[in-house]
Image (cartoon, rainbow, N blue to C red):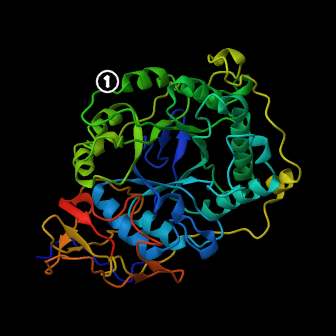
Amino acid sequence: MLLSSTLVALGASLTAALTPLEVQGNAFVNPKTGNKFQIVGIDYQINGAAGYDPAHGHDPLSEADVCLRDAAIMQALGVNAVRVYNLDPNLNHDECASIFNAAGMYMLIDVNSPLPGEAITAWQPWTSYYKEYLNRTFAMVEAFKSYPNTLLFFSANEVINNEATVVDVPPYLRAVTRDLKNYIANHADRKIPVGYSAADVREYLWDTWNYMQCTHDEDKDDMSRADLFGLNSYSWCGKSDFDTSSYDDLVDGLKDTSVPVFLSEYGCNKVTPRPFTEVGTIYVYRHSVHFLEDFQLLAEQYAKLDFKTLQGTKPSKNSPKPPKCDASLIKTKAFNANFTLPDVPPGAQELIDNGIENKPSGKLVKISNWEVDSDFKIWDANWNLLTLSVKPLADDESNKPGNNEASTASVSAGPTSSSASSPASTSNGGTANNDDSAGISVRPAVAFAIAAPIAILLL
C-alpha cells in the first residue's frame, strides 16, 4: 500500500530557502522570528575518512543521488541539521546543498580533512600552519558561504585531546579562528559563525572552553574568539541518567557560557542498540548533533520533543559576557595560558585581504525530482520495500519530526542471499555502491526505523 505521505515532486523550482541564522549572545537565533534555534542533527560522514577521496572526485556532498536518499531518511528522522566532515572545496556541492536546504536542514561544515596539509596537527602545530593550508581553508569558505543553510564552520575538531596537545595547540586554534573570521568578514555577504569542536577530555575541557570563548579587553568582536563551542561527548551510555553520565557536571561547568554550546557528537556505542535516553535531557539544557544509527530508538526519542516550544523561545537579554583572556582563567598546570597568538603566516594576509585565486563558488540550484532512486533498496523490518522521497518544505521552514514518513511499496520479499542490484549512477561519474558512496557513517544492515522499524541495505 502506497501511503499518502509519499512525495514525488517533479519540476520543483527554487521557491524556498532556509533563513541564515545568527549568533546572539549564547544562542543561535532566527533573525526573522527572533526565536532561538535548537540544533537537532546528524553527523554525516559517509564511509568515515575513507569517504573523502578528492583524487577521484568524491566527498560526502558531491553525489546528489546519495544526498537525496540520505536527506529523505534524515527528514523522516526529524533532524534539522547535518554536520559534514572531510569536504573538498573544489567539488560541486550545489545539488546536495540544495537538497538539504529543501529538506529543512542546516549544514555545519568542518573546514579540515585528514589528509596532510589540510588540518592543524596536534603534534607541532606550527609545522601545519602556513599559507597553503590557509588557502585551502579559505576555499572552504568560498565553496559554502553562499548557501543560506550553511550554519557555521568548525575551525578544528578534537585537536586538544591529551596533555601533550594542551601545551602548543591552543594559540593555533585561536589563530585559525581569527584568520577564518577575518576572511569571512572581507569576502562573505553575511557573518557566518566559526567555532571549535572539542573532545570531552574532562581534565582539559573547562580550560579549552575558556581559552576559546574569552576575549581580549572584553572586546566582543575579538576575531580570534570562537563564536560557538561544540562538545563531542560519549559519557551517557545505555540507560543512564543525568548524574551517572556526568551530564550534571557538564551543565554546571558550562552554564555561564558566553557563546552557544552544543553537543557536536554524542551517542556512546558500548551498549547496543543504543536507547538514546539522553535526548530528553539534552534538550532541556543544550542543543545537539548526532550520528544516524540505531534509527528507531533515536526517532522515538526525537518524536517526544516539543518542537513548538523548543524552537519558539526567545534568547536571553542577559547573556553572560565573555571573560577576559587572562592566565587566571586557566586552571590546569600544563595548559597553555599564553594568549599571544602566532602571526599570520607569510603570504596569507594577502589572501585574507584580497581573496584567494580560482575561487570555488556555490549556489542553490533547481532539483527536478525529489524521489529517491529505486536502485537504492530499502526495506522495513518485515522486508517490505520502502519508497522514499524528500518533502520540500516551505520558505524558512526547518525540519521536525512528522514532516516526512516512509511509504510501503507494493513489492515485498526482500533479498534472500548476497545478491545485489545495479548501483546507481552519480553526478560525478562514480557509482553509488558500498565502495564509494555507502551509507551514513555505518555499514549496511544497521537497524533503523521510519514510522516502523526498518533495516537499510545499500545494494
Residue 357 appears left or right of 231: right
Question: What is the crowding at mark 1: few (fewer than 14 residues within 10 Å), some, or many (at least 20)?
Answer: few
Q: Quick check: 409 above or below 274?
A: below
Residue at point 18%, 76% (across, down): 416
| Mark 1: secondary structure | loop
Q: Is residue 266 above or below residue 395?
A: above
Residue closer to the observer: 269 or 109: 269
Q: Residue 369's x, y, as percent?
A: 37, 80
Q: Position of residue 171 (x, y in %)?
A: 73, 34
Residue sitting at the far front: 417
Q: Tell me where residue 399 appears, x and y as whole percent.
A: 35, 56
Q: Quadrant of the N terminus?
A: bottom left
Res. 38 visible in picture: no
Q: Position of residue 276 (x, y in %)?
A: 28, 41
Task: Name the quarter where the C terminus is drawn.
Answer: bottom left
Quickly name the residue at label 1. 244
User: To which quarter of the image does residue 454 belong?
Assistant: bottom left
Q: Is residue 87 left or right of residue 149?
A: right
Query: Which kind of residue does numbered mark 1 sit on?
Result: Thr
Apparent side of residue 34 relative to residue 194 in the rendered image (left or right): left
- Report whether residue 324 is seen: yes
Q: Nearer the viewer, residue 108 or 167?
A: 167
Say above or below: 198 vs 352.
above
